[in-house]
Amino acid sequence: MPELPEVETVRQTLLQLVRNKTIERVSVHWGNIIKRPQDPNEFKRLLEGQTILDIERKGKFMIFNMNDLSLVSHLRMEGKFGVFDASEEKPKHTHVIFHFDDGTDLRYDDVRKFGTMHVFEKGEELKEKPLKQLGPDPFEDAFSLEYFHEKLQRTSRNIKSVLLDQAVVAGLGNIYVDEALFKARVHPERLANTLTKDEAERVRTASVDIINEAIRQGGSTIRSYINSQGQIGMFQQQLKVYGKENTGCPQCGTEITKLKVGGRGTHICPQCQS
């Protein structure tokens, strides 16, 4: 699944390609992707004539801001956006097409068909699901040490599960949580309410640092992720523990171990994160 850095990279590149383009009409070839309104025909009617003014991000969601509406989209497992000339053939797994009045298309491709799209009156998107239930983004001031430490003190779940909880912090996924906990020298099975304030700050800072570096590198290409211009992310070359089981820790040389934490494959250095 694309994580926050991948979604942010898509947002940045896609914005260059579609800003100030006006939607002439919309084609929906797989209606289950459209969650609000539930009628795909109403979805199409609402968006016709709207101009994309900006694209924002909240966690792993992209928010297309238009004249009167906001389109909230989640890529889920393998969703991809791309801009094409309208004359180019539509691939098999293209399920939603936004036809612009300049002869180009914004196409949404999704092999697994798990992606979602919601349309809201502009300004209402943060007041209702799915965005209302999200915690602060790692880059928001609201993701402060005080906020984070208080959340940790209120739960006996392990720290990895807390970091993956989108209601606590929006956008962190399996890859970057493993990397952040390694950088912070905290074992993923530590109970959250046992972390000191200093340890909480190490985890918080490491999470932000890892996400920032991943964005600079264009994200990670672990499965089939590419950004909206077809470029692959390069952060996988910077990974220290994720996917590195049976290799030596870059800091101490101890063999990296893979275990299950909260049902998720998890990579640690048993020495550095003891």
Image (cartoon, grey):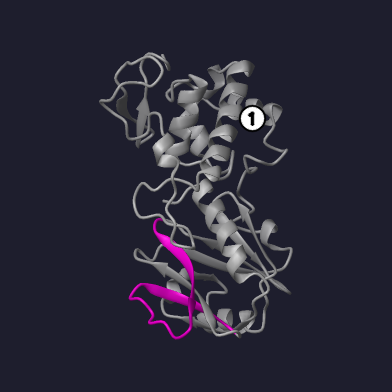
- Is residue 179 rendered magenta in the image? no
Q: Considering depth in this image, is 173 or 189 the residue closer to the camera?
A: 173
Q: Does dot 1 land on a helix, a strand or a loop?
A: helix
Quarter of the picture holding the C terminus: top left
Residue at the (66%, 72%) spot, across then down = 52
Res 20 quadrant in image? bottom right
Q: Is residue 213 left or right of residue 66?
A: left
Q: Is residue 18 left or right of residue 219?
A: right
In the rendered image, is residue 174 in sight?
no
Figure check: 2 above or below 181: below
Expressed as whole percent of the image width and height from the top left, the position of residue 44 reads 56, 82
Expressed as whole percent of the image width and height from the top left, the position of residue 19 reads 65, 69
Q: Count of labels shown?
A: 1
- Is residue 93 rendered magenta in the image? yes
Counting other residues with Cα less than 10 Å from the Cα at mark 1, is it few (<14), some (14-19), or many (20 or more)?
Answer: some
Expressed as whole percent of the image width and height from the top left, the position of residue 32 reads 43, 72
Q: Is residue 189 left or right of residue 101?
A: left
In the rendered image, is residue 129 in sight?
yes
Expressed as whole percent of the image width and height from the top left, the position of residue 223 reads 34, 50
Res 198 quadrant in image? top right
Res 235 quadrant in image? top left
Residue topped by disc 1: 148
Figure check: 254 above or below 235: above
Outermost residue on the left side: it is: 246
Q: Amino acid at mark 1?
A: Phe
Q: Is residue 244 left or right of residue 64?
A: left
Residue at the (50%, 44%) spot, across then down = 217
Range of residues picked out in magenta: 77-100
Figure check: 253 above or below 45: above
Q: Considering depth in this image, is 217 or 59 the residue closer to the camera?
A: 217
